[in-house]
Every structure is written in structure tokens, then in C-alpha cells.
Image (spheres, rainbow, N blue to C red):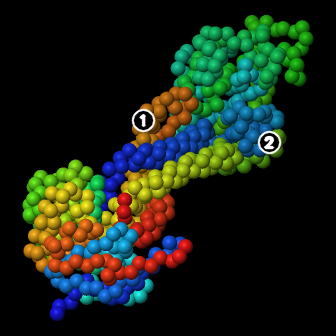
Amino acid sequence: MTIPVLQINGAAFDWGGRSAFGLTVSDFALSKGESVLLLGASGSGKSTLLSMACGTVLPRKGSVFVAGNDLTKLSSGARDKLRAEQIGVIFQQFNLLPFGGVTDNILLPLSFAPERRKRTGDARAEALRLCQALGLPETILTAAATALSVGQQQRVALARAMIGQPPLIIADEPTSALDEGSQNAFLDLLFAQTKANETTLLMVSHDPRLADRFDRVIQISDIAQVTRAAA
Amino acid sequence: MIFRLALASLLARALTVGMTILAIALSVALYLGVEKVRTGAKDSFADTISGTNLIVGARSGSVQLLLYSVFRIGNATNNVTWESYQDIAARSEVDWIVPISLGDSHRQFRVMGTTAAFFDHYKYRQGRSLTVSDGLVMDDLFDAVIGADVATTLGYSVDDPIVVAHGLASFTEHKDQPFRVSGILEKTGTPVDRTVIVSMEAIEAIHVDWRGGAKIPGQTTPVDAIRKMDLQPKAVTAALIGVKSPLQTFAVQRAINEYPEEPLLAILPGVALQELWGIVGIAETALRAVSAMVVVTALIGMMATIFSSLNERRREMAIFRAMGARPRTIVGLLVLEAMVMAAIGALLGVALVYLALVVAQPMLDRAYGLWIPIEAPGLQELWVVLAVIVAGAIVSMIPALRAYRMSLADGMMVKT
């Protein structure tokens, strides 16, 4: 079997301070091209799990592997670079820098990922290709990010996550700000892109209706345990 | 691209950023303006008298001699006898000598007796001569030439009569010998503006009936009789000297200081002016410090603006972080932003100063006789701009470090 794109082994994390919130993630792995839906209500530790996968927070013990690199053994700078190179991130909403144009927003991750930029080739042409593939009008590239509808913003965020074909896409409730019609259209586009590039997709949601579109559905409570110290 | 995004981010907050830049620009303009006025005032001051190699008076302090002979402040301790004056004038090194006789006043202005040569040899602001804006230099015994301030303050015009008072702030007037304003001088920005100039003989003439500082009771010599008298002065208060070669200045100075017949003092006006400026200079330093504080205040204002923008920009920072930006990049962005604001502000400030200078230069000259030269921006401006940029970078480190901690704590997941 090939190296998992993302692998978490018994990682435990504590937020310091009074709330003393802790999260322990048991063994969990994603292989290449797989699409996984992580289901959980808010407060179930999703955000912390995603932050751990992205290397913006470090577990106290255990390990987190992204494309075979143990994040816990890397410097913070190397973790940030690894994230830029390997992971495309889509947030729930407000994905775009409001003061930047659409092109600027799509090309942003390439500024921090030289290899991904090299892979991309002509970045502007690639941005245009992605926009077309995502059903966005060509003219949108020169538009201001703030002029876009929420649905368009999410698609631009998808184009940004896909540019340079990173092996892993992490999407944090990317459709929760959309109405049902737009949700399906967005998921269609998302799957079309990840299938075409054999990209691994980790999507977090609280909506079980999305489950049948994914290869695998994991209840977050099955792999992660939240601990809260008594007040 | 990151730089472009930083600029775009600034543009998106154009109003607050514009205000911050304006505050910096005004503070820099104030600082540079104060500097310009300060150096202008210093130069104007140093140029109060030029072309004169030595000033001679009774022995006292050099600053005191300068104060009463040039600035008409304070009084001479003693006079220089006419014989000593003649001795000095006869020296071979002396090119010209102009006597000055002080002691009387007209209203709040000093009256100075001198010769027509004063108008030829008194120079200010790098060799400028006095010019009469209205009327003529005194011709008759009872003619007076008045400075620009005297004319405007007292509302005098040519041919007006004026009565000279004996001494300063005195109630005893030389009523019997009224003068006539023969000419009004152009504004110079020197103490000449506040002086009533008459001839040496006129000073003698109005004191014909006086002995030992008091009027001889009942004695009034008619003006016609005075005109026929020998009005050779018996003493002068001070004298301005020009030597033939500047190299001889020190030799003449030493000779005068060692003059055996009478205790005299000769000073180099430039040196004495510097000494005097050294005393006034404390105010100058204070002024400078205050205007520098204004620049610091503007920069702290900028820091406050950056601070208050941090919360609303948490999202923005999370996006940068998610895209792989290091916290260091976030710090860099904020510092860069501050440096751009400081740079634009500082350059705008320099531009403002020049604009103000172009507008105000003739007005300042007319109103205060203060000449501020317009020179191409030099090292001073460069240093100020650089210092403001560097200081801007330094103060922005404080909010930037907070952003650093925030972005470390938030990671990339900000729920807003």
C-alpha cells in the first residue's frame, strides 16, 4: 500500500488556559484519492483536528503525518511550507481576501509553495482553466472578491485549493453557507475536481445527508475524544 | 504579489489609512518647517550684520557690545572719545570706519547717530545694503531716516516731524529741535527696522543746551544758531570698522584691545553673534524637541490604528495562514504596511513643507524679515524620511507581535 496522504496516530492535544479543553485522536488515515466525510456536531473537536492536520497546532504526544512527513518533527516554518505545498484549504465562508482580486486570491497559495508553483506552470492560464471548469465566467478573474456571490466565492476558494494540484483538500463545512441547490452544484464540482486529479478529500460537516457521496464516513466521536477538565 | 496585496489591503482601508498618513505628513511637515524656520532664523540672525570686520566700543563684554551696538539692547558702559576714534580711523589697515552714537530715543525706538557712510557699509543677509523705500537718506542736519517697523508702528510717512527724547523711556524731550522724516528704509529683519537714524552732528545739536545729562535751565539756543556752530562730536558710542584685508582683522583687533590711552574693546561680529546665539540656542533645542515629539505622537497614532485593525483582520490573517503563510510573514505584512504608510506620510510631509515655503517665503520676509531659502531637498530631508520609516517599522512591531501571537493561537480556524 502507498503512503497515506494523511495519518494521525494517537495524537493528543491540549488547549492551555482555564477551559482546559483536550482532544485525543486515535489512529486515523486517508489514502490517495479517497474522499472522507467527517461528521460531528460543533464542539466535537473538528476544528482542532483540522488544525492538527494542517500543522497549525501540534499534538502534545502522538504523531501527524502529511504525505509521509511527521509534522511533530518539523519546525513551524517547515510545517507551514508543507501545508502550502500539500494541502488546499476551503473554509465555511469568507474564504477570500476582500481587498484582493479573484486572480490574486486564486494564486495566493503559490506565493508560499515554490514547488506547487512550478507544477502549475502558467499560473494565470491555470486559474482561468479552473474557473472555466468550475462554471465561473471568464470575466470573474478581474473582478474584486467582494463583488462575488457566496456561491461564487466558494467556487473561487475551490479553485484556489485546487491550483497546483495539492494531494490533499481539507474542506471545513464548505457548503453550509449555501442553499441546497448550490450545495449540490458545489459538491458536484468538488468531486469532479478531486476525482480528475486523484486528490484526497477530507470534508467536515454536521450534515449526514451528504454521506452517500463519499467513499467513507467517519463519526468524529469514533476517532476523537474530547476532554474537559471539571471547572 | 504579497507586496501588492499589502498595498491593496491599505487601499481597502483608505479612510483610516489616509488619516494616519495625513497625521504623519503634518507632523513631518511641522518638524521640517520648524527646522527650516530655525535655520532660517539662525542664518538671518548671523546675517544681522555682515561686511563689518570689527565693532569697537568701550571695554565691556563682547556680547554686551554686540547687544547695544547692533541690537540696540542695553546701554554702553562708556563712550569712546573722539580722539581714540580718530586714532583708529587713521590706522593704515582700516579701510572704512562708521561711528555710532546712541542714547536717545523716540517713543519705544532707539535713535542712532551715524554718518552717511553707514548706509554704504552696513550690510545684512550676505552683503545686502540698506535701501530707502520712500524718500531720501538724510541730507539736512535735522533729517531722520526711520526703519520700516518705526514707520509702520507709528504710522509715519516722509516729511512728518518727530521729536527725539533724551535718554530712554524719558519724559524729557528735545522739543526745541524737531526732526523731519526724510526717508523710510526697506524692511530688513534686522534691528535697523526699529531704529531712527540721524546724523552724528544732529546728536550734538540736540545736546547743545545740555550738560552732564540735564538741560541747562532757561537756556535755549535757536536752531539757526545751532546750524552755525561746530558740531564736531566729542565721543562716539561704538564704531563699525572694515579693514583692507581680512588678514589684518586680528592685528587691528589686538591693537585696539591694547590701546593705551583708553580701555577699548574690539570684537568680531560673527564670533559674538555665535556666542549670543549660544545663549538663545536653548529655546531652539526645546522647539526641536517639541516638534520631534509631534512626529512620535503621529507614529504612535499609526500604531493605535494598526492595533484597532487587528481584530477585524483576524479573518484575513487566518486565510494567509491557511494558504501556508508563516506567522513571520504576517508580522512582515504589518510592518511593511506601517513602513509604506510612514514613507508616504514622510514624503508628503516634505512636499507640504516645500509647498508652504513657496507660499509663505515672501510673506515671512515682508512681515518678519525672515528669509528662508528654498533649497532642493538635501541630506536633512533624507534623514528625516528614513528616520520616520524606521521609527514606523519599530512602533509597528508592537501590534505585529500581537498579530503573531494571535495567528499562532487562532491557527487557521477563525469562526467569525
Q: Provide the residue designation for mark 1.
A: B358
Q: Does mark 1 fall on the same chain as mark 2?
A: yes
What residue is rendered at 72% in x and 10% in y?
B178
Q: Quadrant of the N terminus of chain B?
A: bottom left
Q: Quick check: B112 left or right of A159? A: right
Q: Quick check: A48 left or right of B148? A: left
| Chain letter of disc 2 in the image | B
Tell me the kind of residue under disc 2: Arg
What residue is rendered at 38% in x and 50% in y?
B344
What residue is rendered at 63% in x and 42% in y?
B53
Element carrying mark 1: helix
Would you say residue A129 is visible in this rendering? Answer: yes
| Nearer-N-terminus badge (2/1) | 2
Q: Quick check: B381 left or right of B60? A: left
Q: CA distance from mark 2 to mark 1?
A: 45 Å
In depth, the one of B211 and B415 nearer the eye is B415
